[in-house]
Image (spheres, rainbow, N blue to C red):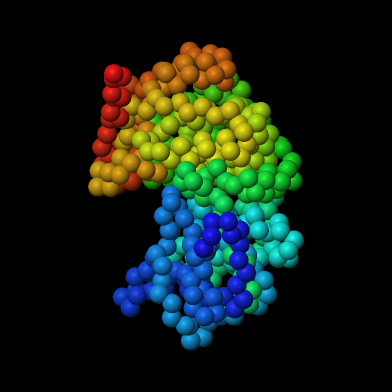
């Protein structure tokens, strides 16, 4: 299919979502087809340049569910809010095209059935961002009377995370519907998330020091999505560890906002976050990389969402002051070995697992 194609309209489209093998295991394969069983290539959803689902071989379903009317194909539905706003929204620009005359988005599940509560939650998330849409998720083989399949114009990976000009305009237009409300100085905390979500060691110390500077210590997971979006619109100075709430912020970020991100894990997830923030909001974004070590589950030692970051907090304070985000660096210090050991002991007890320390390699000297 030509790269210049923005969308295609498929009458009597057939959707084959992931199905079960005989042994009950889900297969990570799906597809959208026309009435003659030909694959609709533009419907393939990409993450970091690769298809999220493998192609499925077409087999005419015996009794597919029939959905009448016109619907926008939304791609793959994710229940996790961070993945939803980065991987399930890239086709929704078509909702604003009056030529299609629909606010209904039809998805393929990431894997297995999707419950009504998840659909309701993501519908509310879109509404908080100023995007009105009715969400449906295919429960099994489905025939759709008229399916508009737009090009994916946003997603995870360097080729998609900035969004097309059209998608950014769509997101910005939606954000303008949201009234700002909240503090101008904000620290986005992960303090009381489940232990397997990870953050930086000593986050309570960081919170105390920033509260002294007039920052609101913000626990977004305790607030409604409407409150979150309104607060992000109101803030002018924002500090956070790298985390998925920053993708939500990016949808409504603004050029006058100054954002500092404290890197908490040795992976490039922060690169997508920065690109998203800068492309959508034109914000001033600085990554503070003072990571010393990753503390990871001994049996599952992959660095990722559940890692705990050991950070040089003294240097973090110096960089925040240099950026004009704080005034006083007294109190900004590294945790002692005993403090680190005590916090790791709490994590190990809560996770019923041992954690191992993986030091961050020193950068190679310049030639």
Pinpoint residue 138: horizontal percent, then vertical percent.
54, 71
Say which quadrant the C terminus sits in: top left
What residue is shown at x 49% (from left), y 65% (from top)? Answer: 41
* Residue 285 in picture, x, y percent from top left: 55, 29
Residue 25 appears left or right of 146: left
Please tell me which residue lies in front, 209 or 142: 142
Q: Quadrant of residue 194?
A: top left
Q: Is residue 71 above or below residue 87?
A: below
Question: Residue placed at 55% from the left, 50% from the top?
Answer: 154
- The answer to whether 221 is drawn above or below residue 188 in the figure is below
Q: Nearer the viewer, residue 148 or 198?
A: 148
Q: Is residue 283 above or below residue 75?
A: above
| For residue 84, side relative to residue 264 (left or right) | right
Q: Residue at x 43, y 49 (%)?
A: 48
Quadrant in the picture for residue 294: top left
Where does the image place residue 180, in percent across and percent down from the top left?
Answer: 72, 38
């Amino acid at each position: 299919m030509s790269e210049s194609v923005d969308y295609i309209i498929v009458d009597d489209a057939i959707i084959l979502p992931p199905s079960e093998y005989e042994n009950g295991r889900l297969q990570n394969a799906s597809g959208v087809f026309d009435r003659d069983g030909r694959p609709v290539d533009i419907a393939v959803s990409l993450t970091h340049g690769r298809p999220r689902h493998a192609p499925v071989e077409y087999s005419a379903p015996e009794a597919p569910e029939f959905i009448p009317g016109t619907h926008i194909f939304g791609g793959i539905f994710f229940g996790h809010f961070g993945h939803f706003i980065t991987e399930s929204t890239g086709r929704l620009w078509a909702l604003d095209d009056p030529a299609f005359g629909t606010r209904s988005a039809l998805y393929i599940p990431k894997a297995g059935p999707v419950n009504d509560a998840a659909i309701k939650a993501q519908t509310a998330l879109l509404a908080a961002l100023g995007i009105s849409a009715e969400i449906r998720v295919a429960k099994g083989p489905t025939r759709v009377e008229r399916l508009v399949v737009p090009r994916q114009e946003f997603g995870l990976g360097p080729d998609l995370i900035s969004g097309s000009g059209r998608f950014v305009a769509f997101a910005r237009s939606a954000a303008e519907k949201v009234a700002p409300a909240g503090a101008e100085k904000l620290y986005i905390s992960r303090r009381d998330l489940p232990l397997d979500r990870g953050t930086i060691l000593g986050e309570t110390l960081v919170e105390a020091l920033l509260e002294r500077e007039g920052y609101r210590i913000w626990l977004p997971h305790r607030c409604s999505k409407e409150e979150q979006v309104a607060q992000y619109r109101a803030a002018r100075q924002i500090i956070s560890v790298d985390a998925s709430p920053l993708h939500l912020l990016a949808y409504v970020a603004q050029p006058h906002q100054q954002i500092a991100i404290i890197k908490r894990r040795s992976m490039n997830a922060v690169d997508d976050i920065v690109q998203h923030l800068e492309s959508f909001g034109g914000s001033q974004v600085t990554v503070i990389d003072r990571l010393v070590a990753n503390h990871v589950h001994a049996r599952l030692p992959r660095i990722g969402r559940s890692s705990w970051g050991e950070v040089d907090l003294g240097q973090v304070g110096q960089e925040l002051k240099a950026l004009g985000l704080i005034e006083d660096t007294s109190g900004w210090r590294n945790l002692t070995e005993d403090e680190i050991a005590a916090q790791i002991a709490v994590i190990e007890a809560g996770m019923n697992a041992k954690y191992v320390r993986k030091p961050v390699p020193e950068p190679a000297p310049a030639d």
